[in-house]
Amino acid sequence: MSAKSVEIIPASGTEVFIPLNKLKKSPNNARKTPHSEAAIEGYAASIAAKGILQNLVVEPELDAEGTATGFYLVTIGEGRRLAQLLRAKRKEIKKTEPIRCIIDTANDPHEISLDENVTRENMHPADQFEAFRRLAEERGFGAEEIAARFGVTPHVVRQRLRLGAVSPKLIQLYRAGDLALEQLMAFAITDDRARQESVYERLSYERDASTIRRLLTETHVAATDRRASFVGLEAYIEAGGTILRDLFTDDRGGYLEDVALLDLLVTARLGREADALRAAEGWKWTEPHLDFPHAHGMRRAYPHPVELSAEDEAALQVAQIAFDQLTEQHQTAEEQPDEIDARFGELETQIEQLEAKRQAYDPGDVARGGAFVILNHDGTVRIERGFIRPEDDKSHPEAGQDGEAEAPEEEGKGDDQASCDGEGGEEESDEEDGEQRLSDTLVRDLTAHRTLGLRLNLNEQPDVAIVAVTHALAAQIFYIGANAHVVGIQPVKTDLATHAVGIEDTPAGKAWSDRHANWARQMPRDVAKLWEFVVELDYDSRMALFAHCTALTVNAVKLPFDLRPRALAAASRLAGAVALDMTGYWRPTVQSYLGRVTKASILEAVREGVSEEAAERISGMKKTEMAAAAEQLLAATDWLPPLLRTAKTDDQVGAPNETQSCDFRSRAAE
């Protein structure tokens, strides 16, 4: 029987170096939940930079007979053992790397393992933030180097460095429990300590992180702003602009600090766009504007249909054939090659450019008119053409006012306006010859009787009344200073863009603009021919024009302290009468609604539009995250806020049917 070698066990409390491959996990370790990969990575990075700062505590492994096996069980320091095994796997150290350990055979291994994890207090986060800052300031370590030495990401290091730079006054409030970490993170959006303290002093009962961020960035411009999108962040930075970054939230590009520089860049680029437009299209003037000035007092000319030249017609036909052939060849392909996509784009652009030539402005209007170059609400350029200033206008009150003109003054105050050619034709001359032989008093007397006769006859002819009202509305909406209407009905238009920013750029806003432009293009250039134009329209077209002009005057905007409760009630009745369904014109998004209401209102919307369970799932989110999640949840629903809902009514007004039709004369007689 061969002699078995006996392992000599060092005395308890002895510090020894044990090869890594002789260390094992202890079954008596109180920590049963495995270490995370991130924790092991952190240990490995720290050990690589600074070595093992705390000895492992081990006990010898004994076999069934109580004899030492030569291996040691790690009672305290399992994470450090795993970190060294990871380093050995990466060939950073050998598997036999000596590990400094303390032998402990005097204490119960399970108890001291539990004691190691229980009887200790973590460093206060504020101490960690400031310690990281000291490493950066005193030792010159960058975020990447600190990250490598502590096994965290550079982004985490940058966050802690930013927190460590917050005002000491606010850090102390955080230590004392008077500020939450989320609030401290909000203050860290800027490194201006004086501003941080100033905002803290301004806080009242609303101390949430979003309020703090809003106050700290109220003089800045978000990178999502239309001006920033238009200029581009690279151009802004190249011009010397600086950007404030929020390391703790999705700041979508940050906040631009130099607003004056940004506005200067926007103005300069819009100016260049305006100059290029004037050179390319020949307008007398072009003006850059951040917002559409609506050109009060100017007449607006619209393009009219023109025939394409033979050359353009041929080019259009060739491009359309090529597009159709390409579509047929690739209609079954799930994914198009880049060169095919590019070819589709070229053909589409060519077709659009040629089709656009079917509409052209009168050369005279271009010679004396101009265009506004405007910054759209999505950061793109918007061009509004065809505006003619009064001093540049000829005497013709031509079609083209886009409905933005103010309503005419009270009756009788426009007599001194300059007469317009076409308004004083042969008929007017005959009337003037007759009036010259009569006194002013007699003229007033006779025309008063004529007016009464007109009223009596018109009262019995509703079809003609529709013509007269349509003529009066169109004369004032599509012409400036014509004084061509005899019916004393004046349209009053409310500019909705002053109440809802960006409403002109919505699909509904563009649809209205297109409809108005379509009517404007059809208007006769001479207002004297407007009556015949209205009369010659077929019934459906005349009613469509009447409805368009009437619709232009609708005003259901509710203002603070609104004193029109009956008018707003009538608006609700009108909504029911036309079966208004706002889901076709408006959707609940972060920008349109969800980002502008309280968290309680967001949850109520999801509760109504989706389900109670969906609202519960997002209830713990921060405001910005909740709003974004709610937008996704409500996208597939028809949910509307109460203000946009249409109550069902019994007075739905539709197209006349046999039961609705009646003899207006008999009704009036009754």
Image (tube, rainbow, N blue to C red):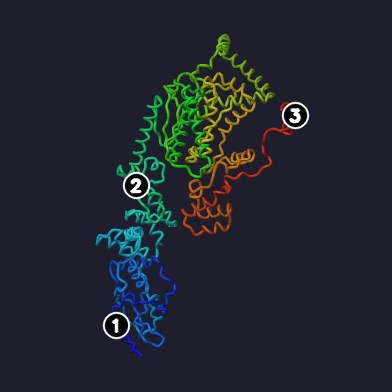
Which mark, by number, is residue 14? 1
Which mark, by number, is residue 257? 2
The image quarter containing residue 580 is top right
Relative to 249, residue 277 above or below: above
Relative to 380, residue 364 above or below: above
Q: How packed is label 1: few (under 14 Cα within 10 Å), some, or many (20 or more)?
A: few
- Mark whose residue sits in front, 3 or 2: 2
415, 263: nearer the viewer: 263
Give whichever of discs 1 and 2 has the lower sequence position: 1
Where residue 630 appears, x then y in whole percent?
52, 52
Q: How packed is label 2: few (under 14 Cα within 10 Å), some, or many (20 or more)?
A: some
Which mark, by number, is residue 321? none
Q: Secondary structure at mark 2?
A: loop
**Residue kind at label 3, given as amino acid type:** Glu
Residue 14 falls left or right of residue 606: left
Relative to 271, residue 415 above or below: above
| Residue shown at 66% from the left, 25% from the top | 463
Can you identify the residue that label 3 sits on? 670
The image quarter containing residue 145 is bottom left
Where residue 114 appears, x then y in whole percent?
41, 78
Where residue 610 appears, x then y in whole percent?
58, 53
**Residue kind at label 2, given as amino acid type:** Glu
Q: Quadrant of the N terminus?
A: bottom left
410, 118: nearer the viewer: 118
